[in-house]
Amino acid sequence: VNGVHDMGGMDGFGKVEPEPDEPMFHTEWEARVLAMVRAMGAAGAFNIDASRFYREALPPHVYLASSYYKKWLLGLEDLLIDRGYIAAGEIAAGHATQPAKPLRHGKFTVNDVERIMVRGKFARAAPAPAKFKPGDRVRAKNMHPVTHTRLPRYVRGHIGVVERDHGCHVFPDSAATGSGENPQWLYTVVFDGTELWGPDADPTVKISIDAFEPYLEAA
Amino acid sequence: MRISNDRAFGIALAAFEPRLASVQERRDALLVVLRQARQRKLVRPLRGAELGMFAFLDLFDDLGAERIKVAGIARCDDAVIDNDLGIFPLTCDPAPTREQIPAISFEAAPRQRLNIAPILKPMTAPDHHHDHDHSELSETELRVRALETILTEKGYVEPAALDAIIQAYETKIGPHNGAQVVAKAWSDPAFKQALLDDATKAVSTLGHVSRVGDHLVAVENTPRRHNMVVCTLCSCYPWEMLGLPPVWYKAAPYRSRAVKDPRGVLADFGVSLPQETEIRVWDSTAETRFLVLPMRPAGTEGWSERQLAELVTRDSMIGTGFPKTPRAPS
């Protein structure tokens, strides 16, 4: 989806403002939101790609005006409602009023905490040989799916070079919509700054993305 | 059951019981009430200040607290309104000015109609300016609590498990993990090569660095090339190595500019590189996670890994900073 979340290259957001001695959470509720997202994901209500998709799907003015964890909260509510784990009326009531829907991995308990603090594995067996190899010139496709994608707009249509092959990984574009893992080859593709930003761009800058094979065509 | 916002309750209590004059007395009384409420399982989940306060009224009724009288409750998280004592703003963000108070919309609690007339008058009473530090019972906070209540009541999550997740984030991950890896790479050429070849595998051999993630890629800074990591689409970050990302990493200014004007972004951090240095920006668009291996500072010959690790900053492993300048080893 061509959303405001796809921020690479946008102007007008001002300076980066690091906060000295920044706390891990600025309010208690931020921590609760993080914990609920992790817990419900681990319990099987959704995967990481779906949770990203729901944050991206927030209306642009809401996305831009909301703090980071506020976006997490809004995305979590929408996702749980759409998948039938909670009802909008329950949020309004502040109580459960409907029966629970069984979770794929069951209730999230203290015994599950350890496993979610280890990062998941996204590599999968390859269903087909890789089309590209390091050194190949590739063009990022000019594609504009209305669903989730991890191909940022600022590289679309531009030519880069495959630098690394990461093997086959879960394809977020499929996983986000519940269409299965559909594993795809994943490559680091490097672009010259001048290729992306024009001849006046800083010639010492190179930018890479990690691109799934369906995002690329030979160039 | 989690108690919602004790300071907001404290303000409410002050409104209800004028004889509790000091903040300390109000808090003490509040604690007694809440303790009894917990024992009798009477504290209810909150949804909005109006529900919270209704629940609170029920609670007081249930506890037989006859001395406490309430005239009405404002809606929209705004205030507790007492016919005798006036309006007590709770959560307006920003807090309403006196001029704005008449514009606050409200409706009466169902059990008693609200008399609007006294609302403005008490605002001028000097002893009602007592508690300016009352906490924000914000709409978001209430919404988060409502959601947690629902997830708990439906049996999806244990609240204690949420506590444990937060505790794990607060204690088990953080830039100290990445700093250990960097310091070892600075000290041990074989480890450094293994790290650059396959960071996931190399880091997993360090027993003392726990919870290593999959798909970790270490990228080395050299005099000719400086690496910088961003996630333009969201907030991907090697949190097992560096902890949760700082706000600036997740915010629009960094995400928008890092790929287009990395030297300008570095200038925001007070970092300047030679003009001929290549800058390589890694946009974390998949599940690969990037850890920058900064250059070892000069003047650290013979330092132990522990001493070296103290020089490694979080930002130096993102590529928006350098390691600390060494002083004499401690």
Image: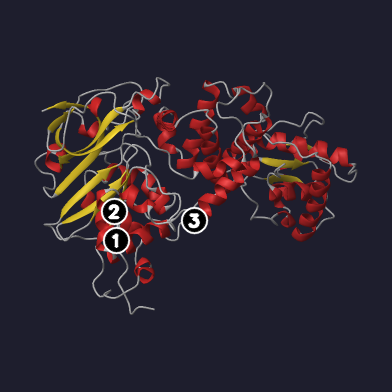
Mark 3, residue position:
A23
Task: Please state the chain letter of the residue tagged with numbered disc 2 in the rendered image.
Answer: B
Q: Are marks 1 and 2 in contact (CB under 8 Å)?
A: yes
B214 and B72: which is toward the camera = B214
Classify residue B43 as left or right of residue B184.
right
Kind of residue at disc 3 = Pro
Dividing the picture into quarters, in which one does residue A5 lie? Answer: top left
Residue at 20 percent of width and 43 percent of height: A207
* Residue neighbourhood size for the residue with mark 1, other residues' Cα within 10 Å, grouped as few (<14), some (14–19), many (≥20): many
Dividing the picture into quarters, in which one does residue B143 lie? Answer: top right
x, y percentage for residue B209? 43, 56
Q: CA distance from mark 1 to mark 2?
A: 7 Å
B60 and A72: which is toward the camera = A72
The answer to which of marks 1 and 2 sits earlier in the sequence is 1
Determine which of the numbered discs, if any, sits on residue B185 in the image: 1
Disc 3 is placed on an element classified as loop
Kind of residue at disc 1 = Ala
Residue at 37 percent of width and 35 percent of height: A122
Determine which of the numbered discs, if any, sits on residue B195 in the image: 2
Residue B127 shows up from this direction: yes
- Quadrant where the N terminus of chain B sits is top right
